[in-house]
Amino acid sequence: MNNIIENLRQELIKNSDEKTRISGERFFKEDVKLYGIKSAEVSRISKEHYKAITDKSKENIFGLCKDLWKSGYMEESFVACHWSYNMHKQYEPSDFSIFEIWVNNYVGNWASCDTLCNHTVGTFIEMYPDYLSGLKEWATSSNRWVKRASAVSLIVPARNGKFLPDILEIADILHSDKDDMVQKGYGWMLKAASQAHQQEVFEYVMKNKGTMPRTSLRYAIEKMPSELKALAIAK
C-alpha cells in the first residue's frame, strides 16, 4: 500500500506547477492544500496508477482512498474519488458508513465535496435509495460540507428525474441555512431537479421565494424559461 501511495505522490509532485497552484487557490475562500495540477492531468495520473494496483479488492481500494483523503491535498482527494467510484459495481449497504466518515472527517472544500458526492455517493444512493434517510440526517449537520453533501449527492439522480419528494424535503431542511456553500449546493440540486420536474420545482420556488436566499433562488431557476424566471424573481 505504501509503495502505491508513494509512487502516486511522486507523480503528482513531478507534474505540479506553482502558477497552477496559486491560480487554483483563488477559487476557494477557505485554505486549501494544492500541489498545483490541472484536473485533466490528475485524472490521467489517477487512471494510470489505478491500473498498476494488483489488489483491486474493494477493501484494499477503500483503504488506499482513506490514506489519500487523510493527506488533505485536494488532488489526492480527487484520486480517492475516482478510485472509490471505480468500485461502484461492488457497493453494498455497509459502504454508506465509510462514505459518511469521509464526508465528516476529510472533506474541507466544495471541489472535494462535489467530486465525491456527485459520483460515489450519488451512485450509491441510486443503488440503495433507502439511504436517502441518511442524506436527510446529513442535512441537519453542523458541518457545512456535510450539509452541502446532502444536496449535491442528488445532482445526477435529480437530472434523471429521481427522488423529487426527497429532494424537496432536503431543500426544506436547508432552506434557512445562512452558509453560502450550503445555499449554492441546494440551489444546484433544485436546478438539476427542474430539468425533469420543471413545474414542480417552479411551484416550490414560488411557494418559498419570500424566504429563499437569493443565491439558492438564482441557482434553482437558472435552467427555467425566461418567463418563469421573471415570475420567480418578481417581488
Image (cartoon, helix red, strand yellow):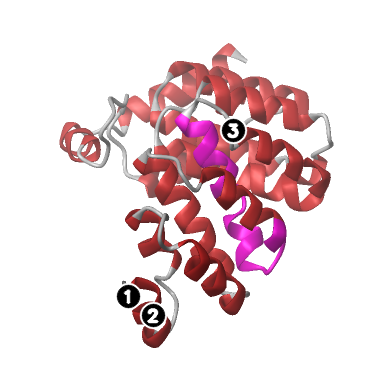
Residue highlighted by disc 2: 231
In the rendered view, tell whether residue 223 sits above or below residue 192: below
In whole angstroms, how far apart are the C-alphas of marks 1 and 2?
A: 5 Å
In whole angstroms, how far apart are the C-alphas of marks 2 and 3?
A: 31 Å
Q: Which numbered disc, 2 or 3, marks the residue closer to the eye?
A: 2
Secondary structure at numbered mark 1: loop
Tell whether label 3 touches label 1 (CB within 8 Å). Answer: no
Q: Which numbered disc, 1 or 3, marks the residue closer to the eye?
A: 1
Residue 116 point in image, percent of width and height:
55, 40
> Which quadrant holds residue 36?
top left
What residue span does the magenta drawing correspond to?
144-165
**In the rendering, which numbered label is found on residue 234?**
1
User: Which residue is located at x 80 percent, y 50 percent?
Assistant: 127
Secondary structure at numbered mark 2: helix
Tell me which secondary structure the magenta stretch mostly adopts. Answer: helix
Label 1 packing within 10 angstroms: few (<14), some (14-19), many (20+): few
Tell whether label 3 touches label 2 (CB within 8 Å). Answer: no
> Which quadrant holds residue 92?
top right
Tell whether label 2 touches label 1 (CB within 8 Å). Answer: yes
Q: Is residue 175 left or right of residue 41?
A: right
Residue highlighted by disc 3: 140
Q: Is residue 56 visible?
A: no
User: Which residue is located at x 15 percent, y 37 percent?
Assistant: 19
Mark positioned earlier in the residue sequence (1 or 3)? 3
Residue type at mark 1? Ala
